[in-house]
């Protein structure tokens, strides 16, 4: 009698254990993830892992425990959450990670600001780290979508400068930046020659936006703000230039929201064709 009961319990327990160990069969069975950047959280949402997030950076708007920032993660807060996986940017130094991440927690440092293809590589790295392999179809879907949309932009080799804003402390995106890569693939000639980004402010090589436009004489200044600000109207270079304003939320974050940004570009292509 006892043996029969024991065998029955084993038959019940084994399938349940296998199911709980496989996150692909049960969406509630997933690693406890700390996402150290809002763009990482968006990526996890896209892959169907958003519900696995237990902690977020101070910049997140999610109602979850805060774990500091990319450059200064909070060791005490991280330890209290007992994460299985800590995902951050490669801006977080390895020596910092060794100090703040508990032993036994897997760490994933993602590239973020150089090329469009890195978005796919980051998603694939997350899939590998979580064994969430059924999400590969989402990665393939994204890769196909952005490449299809970027061909529709047809930049017509127009010379452009890509600016973070008209106000505050703007910067221009240059070679080895994701936006330079995106707009080049879209058929534009991105004029900025300084690698990654050029800071534009007093005391720098180029002190204001007029000086930048005079240096490169672009056809378009493409500015990533939610709406045109008064400072944009003060850009008056020697050679006339057209200014286009695009919602920075659709372009500046290295996430799948870039698909919405490409739709905005496509909607304005009559301006350069």
Image (cartoon, grey):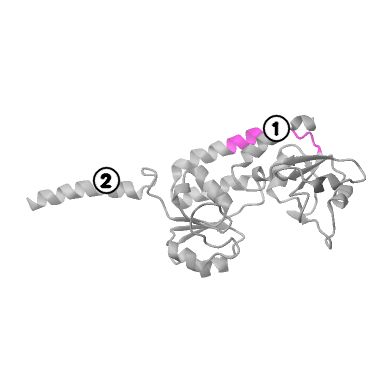
Asked whether, in this view, residue 38 is left or right of residue 193, the answer is left
Quadrant for the C terminus in the image: top right
Q: Kindly tell me whether residue 140 is visible in this rendering.
A: yes
Stretch in magenta: 143-158
What is the quadrant of residue 245 in the picture?
top right
Q: Residues within 10 Å of mark 2 (few under 14, many from 20)?
A: few
Secondary structure type for disc 2? helix
Residue 100 pos. (x, y %): 51, 68
What is the quadrant of residue 199 in the picture?
bottom right
List the single residue furthest toward the right. 238
Q: What label does residue 266 carry, if any?
A: 1
List the single residue furthest toward the left. 1
Pointer 2 residue: 15
Nearest the camera: 240 or 185? 240
In the rendered structure, which disc, 2 or 1, sits on the residue that comes first in sequence? 2
Q: What label does residue 34 carry, if any?
A: none
Q: Secondary structure of the magenta portion, mostly?
A: helix
Q: Kindly tell me whether residue 150 is visible in this rendering.
A: no
Nearest the camera: 54 or 150? 54
Secondary structure type for disc 1? helix
């Amino acid at each position: 009698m006892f043996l029969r009961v024991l065998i029955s319990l084993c038959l019940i327990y084994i399938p349940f254990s296998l199911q709980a160990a496989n996150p692909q069969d049960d969406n509630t069975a997933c690693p406890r993830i700390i996402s150290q950047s809002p763009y990482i959280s968006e990526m996890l949402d896209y892959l169907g892992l958003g519900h696995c997030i237990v902690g977020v950076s101070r910049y997140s708007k999610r109602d979850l425990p805060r774990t500091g920032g990319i450059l200064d993660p909070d060791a005490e807060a991280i330890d209290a959450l007992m994460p299985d996986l800590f995902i951050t940017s490669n801006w977080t130094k390895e020596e910092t990670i060794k100090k703040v991440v508990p032993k036994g927690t897997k760490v994933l440092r993602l590239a973020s600001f150089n090329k469009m293809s890195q978005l796919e590589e980051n998603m694939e790295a997350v899939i590998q780290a979580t064994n969430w392999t059924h999400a590969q179809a989402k990665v393939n879907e994204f890769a196909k979508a952005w490449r299809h949309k970027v061909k529709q932009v047809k930049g017509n080799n127009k010379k452009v400068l890509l600016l973070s804003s008209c106000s505050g402390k703007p910067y221009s995106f240059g070679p080895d930046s994701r936006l330079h890569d995106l707009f080049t693939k879209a058929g534009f000639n991105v004029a900025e020659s300084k690698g990654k980004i050029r800071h534009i402010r007093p005391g720098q090589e180029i002190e204001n936006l007029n000086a930048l436009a005079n240096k490169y004489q672009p056809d378009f200044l493409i500015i990533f703000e939610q709406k045109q600000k008064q400072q944009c109207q003060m850009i008056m270079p020697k050679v006339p230039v057209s200014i286009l304003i695009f919602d920075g939320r659709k372009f500046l974050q290295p996430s799948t929201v870039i698909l919405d940004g490409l739709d905005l570009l496509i909607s304005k292509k009559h301006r350069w064709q």
